[in-house]
Amino acid sequence: MAERGRALVCPRCGSKNVININLSLEHGERVAFYSCHQCDKRWWHKDGAPVDLPDVLEMARRDKGRPAGTEA
């Protein structure tokens, strides 16, 4: 996740016109979404490391249908 007060910079074009949205998934994992308004690059991080969109979707889907607070 991005640190507060620290300017975000797009890794593709270097623009500082980047937004960050932090999300907590239902099963407790936290991910961060970033989007550059200059070049439209979008990327995700989990625990400070890059993660691919298919992996984020899998994390979001993993517990679907299981009651909240239960484990496999």
Image (spheres, helix red, strand yellow):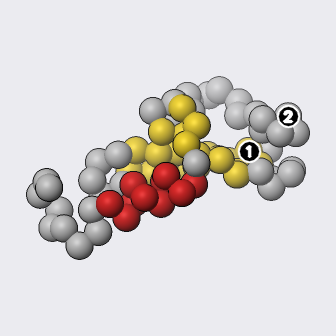
| Residue 61 occupies quadrant | bottom left
Question: Disc 1 designates what residue?
Answer: 18
Residue 21: horizontal and vertical position, in percent?
56, 50
- Give SS at disc 1: strand
Q: Is residue 5 left or right of residue 61?
A: right
Report the residue that reaches farthest toward the bottom.
Answer: 65
Q: Residue at x 65, y 47 (%)?
A: 43
Vertical arrangement, residue 58 with respect to residue 28, above or below:
below
Is residue 15 in view from this perspective?
Answer: no
Tell me the crowding category of disc 2: few under 14, some 14 to 19, or many 20 or more residues within 10 angstroms, Cα based.
Answer: few
Question: Disc 2 designates what residue?
Answer: 14
Residue 35: horizontal and vertical position, in percent?
70, 51
Q: Residue at x 19, y 67 (%)?
A: 66
Residue 44: horizontal and vertical position, in percent?
58, 46
Q: In the image, what residue type sits under mark 1?
A: Val
Number of labelled discs? 2
Q: Residue at x 15, y 67 (%)?
A: 67
For marks 1 and 2, give the CA distance: 10 Å
